[in-house]
Image (tube, coloured by chain):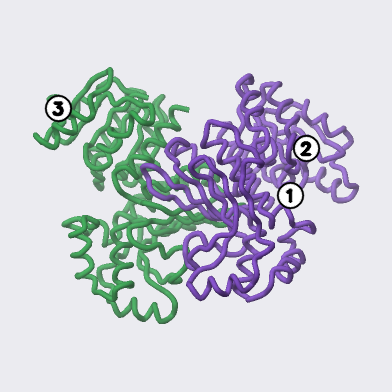
Chain colours: A green, B purple
Amino acid sequence: MRLAVMGAGAVGTSVADLAGEYGHTVTALADSSSAVLDAEGIDVEAALDRKSREGVVGDAAPDAALDADYDVLVEATPTTLDDAEPGFSHVAHALERDKHVVLANKGPVAERYADVRALESASEGEVLMEATVAGAIPALSTIADVGPQHVTAVRGVLNGTANFVLSRMAAEGLGYEHVLAEAQDLGVAEADPSFDVQGTDAALKCVIVANILYDEEYTLADAEVAGIEDIPGSALELAAEDGRTVRLIGEVSQGSVRVGPRLVPEHGTLAVTGTRNIVQLETEHAGRLNLSGRGAGGPETASAVLADVGRLAR
Amino acid sequence: MRLAVMGAGAVGTSVADLAGEYGHTVTALADSSSAVLDAEGIDVEAALDRKSREGVVGDAAPDAALDADYDVLVEATPTTLDDAEPGFSHVAHALERDKHVVLANKGPVAERYADVRALESASEGEVLMEATVAGAIPALSTIADVGPQHVTAVRGVLNGTANFVLSRMAAEGLGYEHVLAEAQDLGVAEADPSFDVQGTDAALKCVIVANILYDEEYTLADAEVAGIEDIPGSALELAAEDGRTVRLIGEVSQGSVRVGPRLVPEHGTLAVTGTRNIVQLETEHAGRLNLSGRGAGGPETASAVLADVGRLAR
């Protein structure tokens, strides 16, 4: 497949970098201020090299990538809320051209799911979004295989930063601020970690799952969200005395979306450690399925993007 | 899709039972001595009721089901070794008729993989086999999504009976013979449990994975297999003192297939308890993925069969 990659952050550059290995060609790559296009396939290495030296991937305007020759638009610009722009317009433009869309950007399908599906219905193109939920973990493809109508609940640890902080606090007996600073030093937490530690990121993933499971449209406003900022070390100590620990759990069940700190068994399936994520599906006929692995990271998320591209190619 | 179901054991009857819920029609169902056919859709409930009363599902000969009107042949007769008959001939017959095949029977793809793929190449039909490895767990579809060439190793607990015995021995400090008898009483172990406790069943699953990962053909004869019959309770006690336990682990890596009892961390990911299975994939770009759930059972395995049918329908 020929790919146009919008966004040259960790995920976009990894997709561009790995595409050739999966048998695909990158015909366009755009960052926020530039683009490089070549219908025969761009020189990915040269573009990324130029980005690291000059801050741009090429000489074209970013939106030129939207009109390039491609089969699949990979939307990997940063997730934005409300109108989900500019990601949403990129998706709309590709679908209007009857091209496929693979999303790593959560915004369009968390905040404007019905709009995306309406555009898809009117298009020859298809929209896939495995990379928007739990990185490398095959959460959405497993829901599709089981059949959304046979999935009764989805819960899990869906944010690696929050999980890193909680597992370090529990393991080392350290306070929230201390561990957060450490996570920032390690590059596990962003300078502004609010999206992760307040539960917003996990909630967006749950909202996407709810949109897939249920008929009505969900947005972030429909989620009940609590973060981990106010958890004292003493709460983790108390939990440990009872063989439990605290995890930031997202849950979609019976039409509701909730994210918040929950007590879970210390050695239980949900108590993944470090930046790992886990997705637990409750199914009607196949019991409980647990899927765990790396929920974020450039190559990990790119691997989910390329799994979707492979699905479109088959 | 219209399904012909060969085999009316736990898996075949569950497939027939659930097919309608997934939007499919069963046009033929065969057990070892009879079949029932109807191009408009058989009355599944009546057929299963007749089987429980009279021991037969219908008045036709079993092989008549092979020539019925269907889109997909579901092969759910018991797994057999060596020539993998009669399953193999059922697969061949369907492919020669340009029909799709979904396997729950491991024999044809563990013992005669190259023959099956050769028949598939000459056919308009496609062969899928998710249900042959770890029941409801989406092992093979995840390998397909990641890309077999990007999976560097697959290991896991692939036999629920052996795992039940080992976890009960460890948890209760009981001996092998005692726990096995208990498992037989509960219906978790068969009257002749050798296929499970000697590692054969887990090895067949690993052989199927090796056939998918590697270019050359593997059969059971290529697997190095040890079972759990000779594990004394004292070995589990010794392991526990060191924070470990014993699990029957199957592993496919670097061109080799091995099954045997291994020491694993007591609270580690591989130490699933009871009849649960786990499949761990090591991937080149996405790190380690853990997939766990119910590895056997009628509805659970039927759910993997119906996921394959759904994939063929898309």
Q: Earlier in the sequence, mark 2 or mark 1?
A: 1
**Residue A276, numbered label:** none
Q: Residue B267 placed where, x, y %?
A: 48, 67
Q: Nearer the viewer, residue A55 or A256?
A: A55
The CA span between labels 3 and 1 is: 60 Å
Q: Nearer the viewer, residue B224 or B55?
A: B224
Residue found 60% across the figure and 41% down from its top: B207
Mark 2: amino acid: Leu
Mark 3: secondary structure: loop
Chain under disc 3: A
Report crowding for label 1: few under 14, some 14 to 19, many 20 or more residues within 10 A (C-alpha).
some
Residue at which label 2 appears:
B29
The CA span between labels 2 and 1 is: 13 Å
Report crowding for label 3: few under 14, some 14 to 19, many 20 or more residues within 10 A (C-alpha).
many
The CA span between labels 2 and 3 is: 61 Å
Mark 1: amino acid: Ala
Mark 3: amino acid: Gly
Residue at which label 1 appears:
B10
Q: Quadrant of residue A78?
A: top left
Residue found 26% across the figure and 72% down from its top: A230
Q: Do the residues at pointers 2 and 3 share their chain?
A: no
Q: Residue B289 placed where, x, y %?
A: 44, 50
Residue at which label 3 appears:
A58
Q: Quadrant of residue A92?
A: top left
Q: Are marks 3 and 1 in contact (CB under 8 Å)?
A: no
Query: Which of pointers 2 and 3 indicates the residue nearer the eye?
Result: 3
Chain under disc 2: B
Residue found 59% across the figure and 70% down from its top: B235
Chain under disc 1: B
